[in-house]
Amino acid sequence: MKKEILLCGVGGQGTVLASKLLAASGLSLNLPVRSAETIGMAQRGGSVTSHVRIGEGCYSPLIADNQADLILSFEVCEAVRNLHFLKKDGTVITSSNSIKPVTSSLSGKVFDSNEMISYLEKNCRKVIVVDNTELCKEFGSDKFFNVILLGVACGAGVLGIEKEVMKDQISKNVKPAFVEKNLLAFEKGFALGQGK
């Protein structure tokens, strides 16, 4: 197996934890794993990008342009910004919601997530759009969206890692007090992904 997965979002959305769960899953299968994060001003709502490369032939931690099999995006603008990484037949799974950047707020410019989704659909072979606000309601926090998104990818068959392997790594790598809710969130995402 060889998978190149780019995760992107803004600070505080759990991008780094999701990438660590993916990397741990690959390692648990005795596969070579390379990963790296570019965080920038993450604590101030800035962009966060994580590269996860799993399988033979992955010598560098960074994914080259046009090489990602999958982009998991926690924020639709970040999916558009990182689209150059996606290979021609790759898949994008993204939140339908955008987080308006400070620069857009200050300038008064329109920031329309529907336009960004339209752009993705015109330029990608497969796009799965999910509503993070709606999906996270029952968990009382959008902090579970990272695991939901992993579940969607797994359920849709584009993650390259089996469901039980991911669940095992969630159990081992999430703080014990949050394991049960994260497993439920993953299952919710998985069920949604199966229909995509």
Image (tube, rainbow, N blue to C red):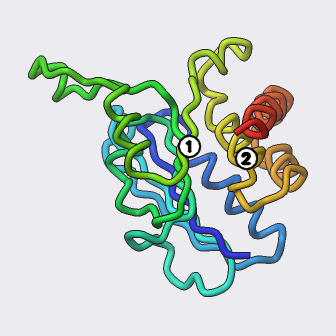
The residue pinned by badge 2 equals: 156
The C terminus - image quarter: top right
Q: Say whether residue 18 is left or right of residue 117.
A: right
Q: Which amino acid does label 2 sit on?
A: Ala
Q: Residues within 10 Å of mark 2 (few under 14, many from 20)?
A: many
Question: Viewer-proximal residue, 153 or 42?
Answer: 153
The correct choice, above or below, for 91 with respect to 57 in the image is: above
Secondary structure beneath dot 1 equals strand
In the rendered image, residue 7, in percent from the top left (x then y), is placed at: 52, 51
The correct choice, above or below, for 55 with respect to 154 in the image is: below
Q: Which amino acid does label 1 sit on?
A: Ile
Which residue lies at the image location 44% right of the left edge and 41% below the top edge?
9
Which residue lies at the image location 78% right of the left edge and 40% below the top edge?
194
Measure how far apart labels 1 and 2 are at the Cα level: 10 Å
In the rendered image, residue 125, in percent from the top left (x then y), is placed at: 51, 54
Secondary structure beneath dot 2 equals loop
Question: Viewer-proximal residue, 85 or 173?
Answer: 85
Q: Earlier in the sequence, mark 1 or mark 2?
A: 1
Q: Mark 1 near mark 2, Cβ–Cβ under 8 Å?
A: yes
In the rendered image, residue 20, in percent from the top left (x then y), is placed at: 65, 55
Which residue lies at the image location 50% right of the left edge and 43% below the top edge?
73
The residue pinned by badge 1 equals: 93
Question: Viewer-proximal residue, 114 or 22?
Answer: 114
